[in-house]
Amino acid sequence: MRRALPALAVAGLLSLTACGGSASPDAAGTSSSSGSGGELTGTLTVFAAASLTDVFTGLGDQLMAENPDLDITFNFAGSSALATQITQGAPADVFASANQTQMGVVTGAGLAEGDPTVFTENVLEIAVPPDNPADVTGLSDFADADLTLAVCAPDVPCGAAAEQVFEAAGITAQPDTLEEDVRAALTKVELGEVDAALVYASDVQAAGDQVEGIGFPEAEDAVNEYPICTLAGSQNPGAARAFLDLVESEAGQRALTDAGFRSPTS
Amino acid sequence: MAFLVLPLLGLLVRAPWSELWPQLTQPQVGQALRLSLVSATLATLVSLVLGVPIAWVLARSTLRGRSVLRALVTVPLVLPPVVGGVALFLVLGRQGILGRWLYETFDYTIPFTTTAVVIAETFVAMPFLVISVEGALRAADARFEDAAATLGADRWTTFRRVTLPLVAPGVAAGAVLCWARALGEFGATITFAGNFPGTTQTMPLAVYLALQSNPEGAIVLSLVLLAVSLATLLLLRDRWLGRSGVPT
């Protein structure tokens, strides 16, 4: 199934961009106008990690409002699926990855234009039900076998990060369940079925009042860096550059921090 | 037919035969397989104890709300298993209707235990047994029971000595279907019971997680599950299913 999915998505995208092209046939070819203040036209296709869905959709709407002739299409999915699609020739202008590894896949294939820059970071946080019934205070509580605890399975990225922080803190974790993805771990907290779970800060933010987040210093040992780049095969480099500038602008960074991400430290 | 068989052939073609033994002898594989077999068998036993009486009521009684009862029994058949898992949480979870009472009174919680695995599997698989047994009961000639009654047998004796032997093949077929469904259960289990090696990680859960990081390992685990299912079906087919057919 994993092998079939990217191919399907690529097929879907091809037909999508084909439709966009026929809607404004002359725009796609003579699209790019250079960044500052000028009217951007044509189609821009952004491939971005699923965790960026809300923030990037908002930023995209903003850019389209400023440039009425610009049409932005997003493809949100897991970073590894996106990297595979790009190396298989999917027509993308911008790639924003949730980790350096998958960006490395794209730069390794020589498909990135210039060097990717880290535009935001996400760290692990402890999510507890409202009012924190088990009085969880820090990472050391994950060694308490009496608590009901959820962490991600080591096979998925948030689980790998969890293993890293436990190791750095010298803690032998006593989880009751190894969840298949970060959303599943968060759901168990929302239902009040676990006392605490280890998830990303942006997930805690997205869950609103249903969970409380507790930061912990060991999270610095597993910081998830989000790199972004324009792609060498871009049909619309001007608009791609403008989108990158917007993400890295003050407004873009504010949208990200509001969603629980944090500005890059380095 | 090819649509049904080709995916299975795909598993065989793509299987990393040279790595088969090292992958199989990993301790997690044996652990997950044992847990799967034990919990599916327990779920089948629970389904027999609870399901046969339900089937009898559906087939034999003249209760008024029978059609409603039948609809309720078949709901888990059409419900997405993940939804079933959430529903189980809402009743038996720590914050659930019954679960909260259990937790506050006995300090006992069901989720994330092997008990939760058995409950999730029973919830999803029992309808298969009920439907099979009900079909068998309908097909069986009720006059034998009437005859037994006129000869002085009470209802329990009639059920035990006449009805059960008549529908035994149907019960067996239902139990096999139920067991196979329980063995493959994924959605309700991972939702309600979570995933922890040795306690709640059954084979389907192990396959799904292996797929994230080790596709070769996932194929090997899938093959084991396929082999176990096929072996069971073949073994039982000769004994029961072959003779009378599946009465659904």
Image: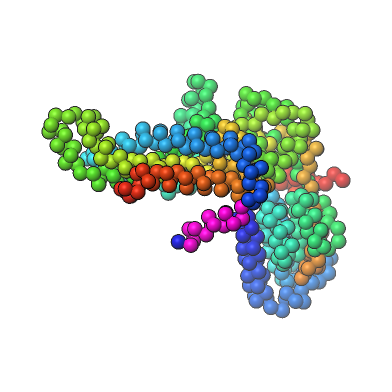
Is A32 in front, or is B229?
Answer: B229
Residue at the left extreme of this rendering: B150
Image side of residue A209 versus residue A106, left or right? left
Secondary structure mainly formed by the magenta segment: helix
Query: x, y percentage for residue A208?
Result: 64, 41
- Vertically, is B28 above or below A47? above
Q: Nearer the viewer, residue A172 or B184?
A: B184
In the figure, residue A162 lies in which quadrant? top right
The quarter of the picture where residue A72 lies is bottom right
- Please, which residue is most extreme toward the bottom here? A26
Q: Residue at x 66, y 36 (%)?
A: A151
How many callouts does the rendering have? 0
Image position, residue A238 (x, y; %): 81, 68
Q: Quadrant of residue B69?
A: top left
* Residue B134 relative to residue B107: left or right: left
Percent coordinates x, y for residue A35 in the rendering:
83, 66
